[in-house]
Amino acid sequence: MSPLEFHDLTVSYRQKPVLYGIDACFPTGALVGIVGPNGAGKSTLLKAGMGLVPMSSGWVRFFGEPLAKVVRRVGYVPQRNAVDWDFPVNVRDVVMMGRYGRLGLFRRPGKLDRRIVEDSMERMGIGNLGSRQISELSGGQQQRVFLARGLAQQADLYLLDEPFAGVDAATEEAIVVLLRELKQQGRTVVVVHHDLGTVERYYDHVLLLNMRLIGFGPTQEVFNVENLRQAYGGQLNVLSRLALQRARTTEG
């Protein structure tokens, strides 16, 4: 059973379509990068899947079911700018939010929940920041908090919206390590990604998007110049940089 499937998904803003007829069936245990130019609908695709924006047509299934039936199995990490970081709450409380889906409305966090939260913070290198107010964190630390919250949820499918945006090199490396660990555990990870230069190193599958689906499959098959030209159109500078990087890699 596919962890995530889109069928004929169309999304419109103010009667203007931003995604057209997307069909994609994600394999279990894949590390998938969603790639495309600005305005291509990458983040909208994840938001539509999570029910955060309305669909004009089509459907989305998680493990063969509507999201409501399997919501505990799905972890969603939105963009950092979607959060009010001035809200008076500390790091540990934010990470604990990842446990709420398993706790239900009336159960208080127990010893196991607290241990999972502490372990999640340690894995993201923020174990010493539990009492820190989130307003005091750097951008990289904020992203680590978000990911620790996702880890605490112990999901089978993770949807990450631009986790690498605006982070330092150490945080980017920590995120890459985490993604690979999740894949090794058999979990499926879907990431909205903007840096073409790292796609081939980070992901084993790519969904190439520009309002319509350009290509989806193993990175070696989909991430090629022809598909990138279709996705990015006249932005030849993007393709030139990619070709240059590939040439340097080959020479090395």
Image (cartoon, rainbow, N blue to C red):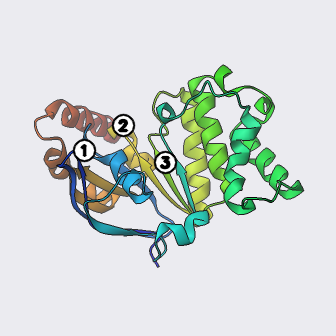
Residue nearer the viewer, 88 or 232: 88
Query: In 3D space, how far apart are the residues under numbered discs 1 and 3 (Cα atoms)?
Result: 16 Å
Residue nearer the viewer, 206 or 148: 148
The residue at the point 56 percent across, 53 percent down is: 180
Q: In the rendered structure, which amino acid carries the disc numbered 1?
A: Ala
Q: In the rendered structure, which amino acid carries the disc numbered 3?
A: Leu
Q: In the rendered structure, which amino acid carries the disc numbered 2?
A: Asp
Can you give x and y, in whole percent of width and height, for residue 108 in the image? 83, 55
Query: In 3D space, how far apart are the residues under numbered discs 1 and 2 (Cα atoms)?
Result: 14 Å
- Give the labeled residue for mark 2: 195
**Image check: 112 left or right of 134?**
right
- Check the image and report above or below for 64 versus 41: below
Crowd band around label 1 with a 10 angstrom C-alpha radius: few (<14), some (14–19), many (20+): many
The residue at the point 18 percent across, 52 percent down is: 227
Residue 24 at least partly seen? no
Secondary structure beneath dot 1 equals loop
| Mark 1 in CB contact with mark 2 (< 8 angstroms) | no
Sooner in the amino-acid sequence: mark 1 or mark 3: 1
Sooner in the amino-acid sequence: mark 3 or mark 2: 3
**Image check: 113 left or right of 46?**
right
Q: Quadrant of residue 248?
A: top left
Q: Quadrant of the C terminus?
A: top left
Nearest to the eye among marks 1 and 2: give it.
1
- Check the image and report above or below for 87 versus 153: above
Sooner in the amino-acid sequence: mark 1 or mark 2: 1
**Image check: 221 left or right of 145?**
left
The residue at the point 67 percent across, 56 percent down is: 153
Can you give x and y, in whole percent of width and height, for residue 91 in the image? 72, 34
- Give the labeled residue for mark 1: 40
- Give the labeled residue for mark 3: 160
Secondary structure beneath dot 2 equals loop
